[in-house]
Image: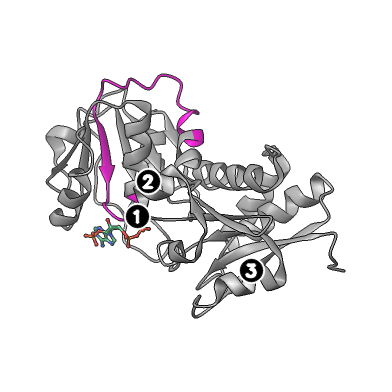
Amino acid sequence: MINKKNKVLGVLGNPLKQSMSPLVHNYWINKYNLNSHYCKFQLEKIDNIKIAIKALNLKGLNVTIPFKKKIIKHLDKIDKTVKTLQAVNTINNNKGTLEGYNTDVAGFLLGLKKIKKLNLKEPAIVLGAGGAAESVVYSLHLIGVKNIYIMNRTNNRAQKLARKYTEAKAVKWIEYDLVNNAGLIVNTTSLGMIGYPKLPISLKRVSKITKVYDIVYNPLETKLIKDAKKLKLEYVTGLSMFLGQAQESFRIWFNIKPRVSDYLISKLKKDIKIL
Ligand code: ATR
């Protein structure tokens, strides 16, 4: 039973059928005995979202497609990351003040920590120039990567993103001279995801020190990750970023850094397979 003593949270987006956030957050809520529940709020419009959050006394929300930008004007406060990226993925209801955060940056960086020796002087390549690419470029800027090459099918989007960061440069879509000498390659496009074509990139001539990070987590192992594995390159899958952003949202709401257990990972892997 939901009463005044417990907290309701959820994810706001449309569509939400495939969202794995309820599984993850309800797992942690139970594990830490928090007397809360995390639901799906699939809405057509968010014009009255502020009234709705307050009327339902929601503790917090994750925000996903197509509301990440549209939500901003309904919030009372936003942090520096949101100001920079102009996108919110987490709302915290702090005693009636609605605060907006973007935990995709922390999530990406938590995943990146899995790489043992990342050389910041080696160039990084970001494939894609959408919202996800922007949080990745900003993350790389924050940790001090010296050169970031943005490759996107639509070059003017790459140029627009590159203009925001002095370390970033827009280059041709799959420019092999750069791919083959990269320290890190990050895929932020939808390519490789279930229902999309594969990413048209060959890793055959990349250097042995190249690290590969695919933020796509459905399937768990994209062709890019399979190729990296075959070539014995260090890699990070999209599940790490997904779990990282969820951990950071949970910390904002409950002031607890939740643990990613093997059991949770196996539950998620099962869920992804049947998506
Ligand atoms: P998100 O906010 O998740 O990043 P997005 O803004 O729709 O979503 O961006 C999707 C990215 O995938 C873009 O970089 C897009 O390239 P374009 O800017 O050229 O559209 C890329 N993408 C999607 N389908 C693609 C395809 N078939 N070939 C190459 N790039 C593709």
The residue segment tinted magenta is 110-133
Q: Nearer the viewer, residue 231 or 244?
A: 244
Label placed on residue 131: 1
Give the residue at mark 2: 135
Verify whether residue 98 appears in magenta.
Answer: no
Q: Amino acid at mark 1?
A: Gly
Indicate the quadrant containing the N terminus: top left, top right, bottom left or bottom right.
Answer: bottom right
> Does label 3 or label 2 sit earlier along the sequence?
3
Q: Amino acid at mark 2?
A: Ser
Task: Tell me if residue 219 comes above or below residue 49 in the rendering.
Answer: above
Determine the residue positioned at 33% across, 56% down.
191
Percent of width and height locating residue 197:
31, 61
Q: Tell me if 66 is positioned left or right of 35 in this view.
A: left
Q: Indicate if the residue with disc 1 has its beta carbon within 8 Å of ligand 1.
A: yes
Whole-Å distance between the Cαs marked 3 and 1? Answer: 25 Å
Indicate the quadrant containing the C terminus: top left, top right, bottom left or bottom right.
Answer: bottom right
Percent of width and height locating residue 155:
14, 54
Whether residue 215 is visible: no
> Does label 3 or label 1 sit earlier along the sequence?
3
Q: Quadrant of ligand 1?
A: bottom left
Do the residues under discs 3 and 1 have CB atoms within 8 angstroms? no
